[in-house]
Image (tube, rainbow, N blue to C red):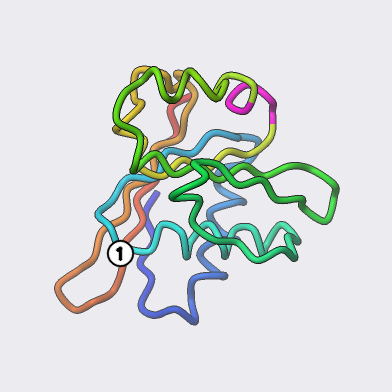
Amino acid sequence: MEWKINDLSEIKEVAAKFLEYAGKETLFALYGPMGVGKTTFVKAVAACLGVTDDVSSPTFAIINEYQTEKGESLYHFDFYRVNNISEALDFGYEEYFYSGNRCFIEWPEKIEELLPENTVDCYFSEEVDGTRKLRVELNS
């Protein structure tokens, strides 16, 4: 599935369609260059799920946790500053990835060997005209 995001005003609508398409899937690997809108997209998804906290990139913390309006946890990871797999192992990634809660993983290429088979691959790109494209591949 693929969506085009013409400008920021459309991102929440695309996030809602994404959630509908993803169904019961919980693990999302967000691929794309810095500045393409991965964190902005996670903010929009969180808003659709009723998260009222300020959603920001967990670049230094590696992980941020948010509560949805249903009381479920949403985990947002940023592995940009992770230098090796052992750093991901040290904070106990399994507890989050296998929790049944939604996990959004930025810079998944840094820990690809740890990603479960059912991880949904989400590819973000910027087009020449400045619009963004999101292509989603369900793997289960």
Amino acid identity at mark 1: Gly
In the picture of the structure, the residue carrying the numbered disc 1 is 35
Front one among 82 and 10: 82
Q: Relative to residue 93, is residue 125 depicted above or below? A: below
At x 49%, y 71%, the residue is: 11
In this image, 86 relative to 69: left or right? left
Q: Main secondary structure of the magenta part?
A: loop
Q: Residue furthest right?
A: 70
Q: Name the image quarter holding residue 113.
A: top left
User: In the rendered structure, does residue 139 fall within the stretch colored magenta?
Assistant: no
- Above or below, comparing residue 92 to residue 50 in the picture: above
Q: Residue at x 75, y 65 (%)?
A: 52
- Residue 127 in percent (x, y) is at 20, 68
Vertical placement of 28 versus 132: above or below?
above
Count of marks overlaid on the render: 1
Residue drawn at the location 26% of the way across and 58% of the way down: 125
Which residue sits at x=25%, y=54%? 33
User: Which range of residues does the magenta coloring cover?
Assistant: 96-100
Q: Position of residue 16 (x, y in %)?
A: 60, 61
* Label 1 residue SS: loop
Q: Is residue 15 left or right of residue 49?
A: left
64 and 75: which is toward the camera: 64
